[in-house]
Image (tube, coloured by chain):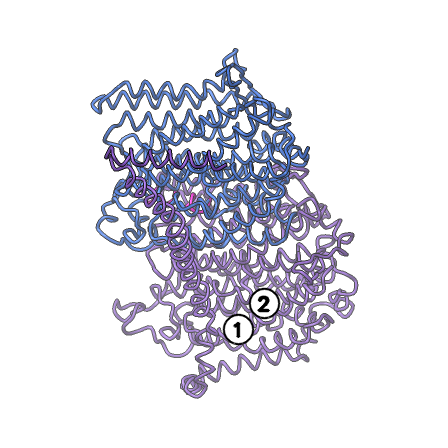
């Protein structure tokens, strides 16, 4: 701990506090103040997470930076925080992304600015809470709390069909979460009144109970990832969400599901995880192939990127459920990389949308003629999305594929089809939007990136390249944690 | 010396970054200067390394750990040996020539700085590819050159045909890379490392392993690995049936066609297989597959070249055919011959492309040979250098192509692997076809009547001056490439039979056709004398004679033949229908299939039945509840009485 500061609490509460302050600025005439406070809060929130990386001991197993305080003593609920390498990377990604979305919404949002920015800050704090909670109820509270700001973001600042999308998003995810709560209450009972995840890790459970718990967890997490066939809320949510909402949704919120598998499913019910791994792998591969083909035919850029997200998240769940180090580390790396790339792609669409007010591929063509700098950055992200080596997009996919081939040759072969599908849908879209002669007067009137847009996309471009050329600093912090996790998975917990 | 290895790829990278990001600041001259300085440094460093390697030095160095995971460390590093040093020298030299040539060719282009940045960046990736000491970095370079090929084919991004061609090229390559990546994954699984040296050292001990690819179908591990890797080579080196992208890649500017789509990138697949010779030698099945694929490409692509009228497309199909030769050499275990042909081909094919480009600029971007002719008088340097390229390509004794091509034909003749008979027949016939289309190009362009007057893009009649020779930045590279197009062949003795490649290429004793040939090799003069008595030589002469007769003596005949051989001509002109079939099957097919999944799966079933269906179920349930919740006291009272009665009944009955 740095100078005795509870860093994890800071990472959670600084954004939330900043959010409260932003709200306090009130009406839109105070927007400049709201923006500044939001930026300061998000930057500070990111800065306090940096010592987490610097002081993280990559060789130690177990959880670090633990904080423990009683919360609801009568139910033995504790404010128990702690992180391993997986949480660490996700917290860093989340806090980094928050800075970007605050910047991205700077001038674009014109109504209820303070509320908009506050929603993102709250969301950021809640998600850091999910990633660091070691108490099941605390985890659940944060997990559910994230729904509210996102529901509001889509429902208030969204597109014309925002109410349908927001309700669909809310009900879909809530349905799963309720089963999660039931499973946690069951675990509370069988563990003699403990909500500690660490206690659950040691808890013997019969196979039937494990399978039921797994299914309850799965309903909650698979919706979030989202896994086929529980994915149809995502394209709608993305299409209606404002740019910042899409960025956070794709970059961070989807990871809550995958994180749930890693933090809860695998170590708490390892035998059920093994028993049902085949199903999860099959669904993951369907996501890669089926969704890849569906992405190909989308006419709406945001929908296309949403489907691309589902397809890429298929690699994450595949990597988790093949139970080896390459796959697991690949899955986490893929999560981080996907956070950069999908965030960047949604920002790119946002840049176009802000100017032309259309997300339709057919409304563009020849954008490179008027926005060359934008086209170059968009090209980088498109290639990263196609998994080009040297960008972050390759690293996770490569590791999951080399992990999968150890389990079954055909898993790897099916996953590797993304080399073709991913390139096909991404570059075909890119071709139709960016290349060609100037298609219409809207495209002719486009102005290239402004300084703020360039800063946001430039930072992401840097992240994508650094992670692609030198992923080791990201993987380094994972080894001990993944090792722990694989140990949990290999030890049967049948009584 | 190790610092020098780093300088070789990083100098072009630095040039590319400066020209790319700061091209607006340093201007056109700044952009070509900085990239050319980078290339000169790289070429000189490659030459130093090459000389060092000739003295017997080899080096395997790691630069940094890219990633460590599980028990595997993925390193970035260089393996400098006879093979990689030769490749580095060829790549950097040809690239330097192309950089210089580009100053002239792209002089009027608004994307000047961007172009220099791209070709330097391409050179960086290509050098990383050839100098790599492991499979992962090989794949990095491999995809990197693919990216640059994509960007350069679509360099003129407002042209619909160019942006179609670039996408097609990238996706066709990705199909091959799919196999390549799975192959790398299989290697990692069995060998536990991706380092060349470690993999090759253990290859023999793992050769007995088998993989059950399908239930009941068990294949040897090496066959699986080698065929998967070869899929990558089929994409990058445009072998049948993944060849479709290369002719379309001619949409890119001509310097690119010379550098990427003739001399360097497309030979990456050939280089890769030669590099993996310790693996390929352990699978005769894979070698046969390689040989047959190469033979098909060699013959059938050459035939297409005869009917093309676009000067660049003729050269493109010629490249496909020559790549087929190299592939056959690999399949016959004559790796050294394949690499040797790669080197000579790099010179004479780059020369042919740049010569074609010189003609194209002289005629103001006219590419149709039917509107050329008689340019010999106007462009003497271009004519003579192109002629050298042509005879080298046809394989006339004394020129570079002769030695390398003759060695391949001889090697495949001696090979006893299944498929060698067909391959020999195909390659020998291809000699005739090669001579025919090459001299057709030469005669239609430089000899005969001047057809560039009159309307059309080349319309020289209109502005009243004859086409003139290109500037020195164009002709000097032509001359500099013409020299090795003659001389490079004389290295055949040491390279093929003198053990030049040493340990960098491994050949199983039973496959060693080159050793057999080496016993009968008595110097280049004897080889040339001997060639006069063999079939390929006479085939080549016959091809040239046919071309002369058809295109100079009786220029009316080709059209008559076209009329007569209608079906055959159509088949060739439509390139056997691959483009249409692929577009229908994979392009439109994927769209149809994707639409079906989307509309049928996502929209109709998942959303329609389950999501909205459950919403409807809830709505129905709510309607029932709403009906009950009527708000009238007597309804509730009535319901309560019924409820009490039911409860009482239950209590008393039980």
Residue A31 part of the magenta-drawn span: no
In the rendered image, residue A27, in percent from the top left (x then y), is placed at 22, 22
Callout 2: SS? helix
Residue B265: give its label.
none
Callout 1: SS? helix
Q: What residue occupies the far top of the structure in this picture?
A: A3
Q: Relative to residue B177, is residue A115 drawn left or right?
A: left
Please give the name of the residue rendered at 34% of the width and 27% of the height, measured from the top-left corner: A119
Marks 2 & 1 on one chain: yes
In this figure, which residue is indicated by the disc labeled 1? B302
Is the residue under label 1 in contact with that under label 2 (CB below 8 Å)?
Answer: yes
Residue A377 part of the magenta-drawn span: yes
What's drawn in magenta, residue-wise?
A372-384
Q: Colour of chain B?
A: purple
Distance of label 2 from label 1 (alpha carbons): 10 Å
Quadrant in which residue A159 is drawn: top left
**To which chain does the residue with label 2 belong?**
B
Nearer-the-camera pick, B91 or A275: A275
Q: Is residue B89 visible?
A: no
Q: Is residue B272 above or below residue A357?
A: below
Nearer-the-camera pick, B533 or B324: B324
């Amino acid at each position: 701990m740095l100078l005795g500061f509870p860093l994890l609490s800071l990472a959670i509460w600084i954004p939330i506090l900043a959010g409260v302050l932003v709200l306090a600025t009130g009406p839109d005439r105070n927007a400049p103040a709201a923006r500044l406070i939001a930026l300061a809060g998000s930057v500070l929130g990111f800065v306090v997470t940096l010592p987490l990386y610097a002081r993280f001991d990559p060789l130690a197993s177990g959880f670090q930076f633990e904080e423990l305080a009683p919360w609801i003593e009568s139910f033995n609920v504790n404010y128990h925080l702690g992180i391993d390498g997986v949480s660490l990377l996700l917290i860093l990604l989340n806090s980094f992304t928050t800075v970007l979305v605050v910047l991205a919404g700077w001038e674009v949002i014109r109504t209820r600015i303070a509320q908009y920015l506050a929603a993102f800050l709250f969301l950021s704090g809640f998600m850091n809470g999910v990633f660091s909670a070691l108490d099941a109820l605390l985890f659940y509270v944060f997990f559910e709390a994230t729904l509210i700001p996102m529901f509001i973001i889509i429902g208030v600042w969204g597109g014309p069909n925002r109410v349908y999308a927001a309700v669909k998003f809310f009900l879909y995810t809530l349905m799963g979460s309720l089963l999660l709560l039931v499973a946690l209450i069951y675990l509370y009972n069988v563990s003699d009144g403990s909500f500690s995840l660490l206690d659950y890790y040691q808890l013997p459970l019969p196979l039937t109970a494990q399978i039921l718990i797994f299914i309850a967890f799965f309903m909650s997490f698979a919706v979030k990832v989202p896994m086929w066939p529980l994915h149809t809320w995502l394209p709608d949510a993305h299409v209606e969400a404002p740019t910042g909402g899409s960025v956070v949704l794709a970059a961070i919120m989807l990871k809550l599901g995958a994180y749930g598998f890693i933090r809860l499913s695998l170590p708490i019910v390892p035998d059920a995880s093994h028993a049902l791994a085949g199903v999860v792998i099959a669904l993951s591969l369907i996501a890669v192939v089926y969704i890849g083909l569906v992405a190909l035919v989308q006419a709406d850029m945001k929908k296309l990127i949403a489907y691309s997200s589902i397809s890429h998240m298929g690699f994450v769940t595949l990597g988790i459920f093949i139970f080896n180090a390459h796959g697991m580390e690949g899955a986490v790396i893929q999560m981080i990389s996907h956070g950069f790339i999908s965030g960047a792609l949604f920002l790119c669409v946002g840049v176009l949308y802000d100017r032309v007010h259309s997300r339709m591929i057919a409304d563009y063509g020849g954008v490179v003629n008027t926005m060359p700098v934008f086209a170059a950055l968009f090209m980088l992200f498109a290639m990263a999305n196609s998994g080009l080596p040297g960008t972050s997009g390759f690293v996770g996919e490569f590791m999951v594929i080399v992990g999968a081939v150890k389990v079954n040759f055909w898993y790897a072969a099916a996953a590797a089809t993304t080399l073709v599908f991913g390139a096909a849908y991404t570059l075909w879209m890119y071709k139709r939007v960016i290349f060609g002669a100037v298609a219409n007067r809207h495209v002719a009137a486009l102005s290239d990136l402004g300084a703020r847009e360039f800063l946001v996309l430039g930072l992401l471009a840097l992240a994508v390249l650094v992670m692609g050329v030198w992923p080791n600093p990201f993987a380094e912090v994972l080894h001990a944690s993944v090792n722990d996790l694989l140990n949990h998975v290999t030890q049967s917990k049948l009584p | 010396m190790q610092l020098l290895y780093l300088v070789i790829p990083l100098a072009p990278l630095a040039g590319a970054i400066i020209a790319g990001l700061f091209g607006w600041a340093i201007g056109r001259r700044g952009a070509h200067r900085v990239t050319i300085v980078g290339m000169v440094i790289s070429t000189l460093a490659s030459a130093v390394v090459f000389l060092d390697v000739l003295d017997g030095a080899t080096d395997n160095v790691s630069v940094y750990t890219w990633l460590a995971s599980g028990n595997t460390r993925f390193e970035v590093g260089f393996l400098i040996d006879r093979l990689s040093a030769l490749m580095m020298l060829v790549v950097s030299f040809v690239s330097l020539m192309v950089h210089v040539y580009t100053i002239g060719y792209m002089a009027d282009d608004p994307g000047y700085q961007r172009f220099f940045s791209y070709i330097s960046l391409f050179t960086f990736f290509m050098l990383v590819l050839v100098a790599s000491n492991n499979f992962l970095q090989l794949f990095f370079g491999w995809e990197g050159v693919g990216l640059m090929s994509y960007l350069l084919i679509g360099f003129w991004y407002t042209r619909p045909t160019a942006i179609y061609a670039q996408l097609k090229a990238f996706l066709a390559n990705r199909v091959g890379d799919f196999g390549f990546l799975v192959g790398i994954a299989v290697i990692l699984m069995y060998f536990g490392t991706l380092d060349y040296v470690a993999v090759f050292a253990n290859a023999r001990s793992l050769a007995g392993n088998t993989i059950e690819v399908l239930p009941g179908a068990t294949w040897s591990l090496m066959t699986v690995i080698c065929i998967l890797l070869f899929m990558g080579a089929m994409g990058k080196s445009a072998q049948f049936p993944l060849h479709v992208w290369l002719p379309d890649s001619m949409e890119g500017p001509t310097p690119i066609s010379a550098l990427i789509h003739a001399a360097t990138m497309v030979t990456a697949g050939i280089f890769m297989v030669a590099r993996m010779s310790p693996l390929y030698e352990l699978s005769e099945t894979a070698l046969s597959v390689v040989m047959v694929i190469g033979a098909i490409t060699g013959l059938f692509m050459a035939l297409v070249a005869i009917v093309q009228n676009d000067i660049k497309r003729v050269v493109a199909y010629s490249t496909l055919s020559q790549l087929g030769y190299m592939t056959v050499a690999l399949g016959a275990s004559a790796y050294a011959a394949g690499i040797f042909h790669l080197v000579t081909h790099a010179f004479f094919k780059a020369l042919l492309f740049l010569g074609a480009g010189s003609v194209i600029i002289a005629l103001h971007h006219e590419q149709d040979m039917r509107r050329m002719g008689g340019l010999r008088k106007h462009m003497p340097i271009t004519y003579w250098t192109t002629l050298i390229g042509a005879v080298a390509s046809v394989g006339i004794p004394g020129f570079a192509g002769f030695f390398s091509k003759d060695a391949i034909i001889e090697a495949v003749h001696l090979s006893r692997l299944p498929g060698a008979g067909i391959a020999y027949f195909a390659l020998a016939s291809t000699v005739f076809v090669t001579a025919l289309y090459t001299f057709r190009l030469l005669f239609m362009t430089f000899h005969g009547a001047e057809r560039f007057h009159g309307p059309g893009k080349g319309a020289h009649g209109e502005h009243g001056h004859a086409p003139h020779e290109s500037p020195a930045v164009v002709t000097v590279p032509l001359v500099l490439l013409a020299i090795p197009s003659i001389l490079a062949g004389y290295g055949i003795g040491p390279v093929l039979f003198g053990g030049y490649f040493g340990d960098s290429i491994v050949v199983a004793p039973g496959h060693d056709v080159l050793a057999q040939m080496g016993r009968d090799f008595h110097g280049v003069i004897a080889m040339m004398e001997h060639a006069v008595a063999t079939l390929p030589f006479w085939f080549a002469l016959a091809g040239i004679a046919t071309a002369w007769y058809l295109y100079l003596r009786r220029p009316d005949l080709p059209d008559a033949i076209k009329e007569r051989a209608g079906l055959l001509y159509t088949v060739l002109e439509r390139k056997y229908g691959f483009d249409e079939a692929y577009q229908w099957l994979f392009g439109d097919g994927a769209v149809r299939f994707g639409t079906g999944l989307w509309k049928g799966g996502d929209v109709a079933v998942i959303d329609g039945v389950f999501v909205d269906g459950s919403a409807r179920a809830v709505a129905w349930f709510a309607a029932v509840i709403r009906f009950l919740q009527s708000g009238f006291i007597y309804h509730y009272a009535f319901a309560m009485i019924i409820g009490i009665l039911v409860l009482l009944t239950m209590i008393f009955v039980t």
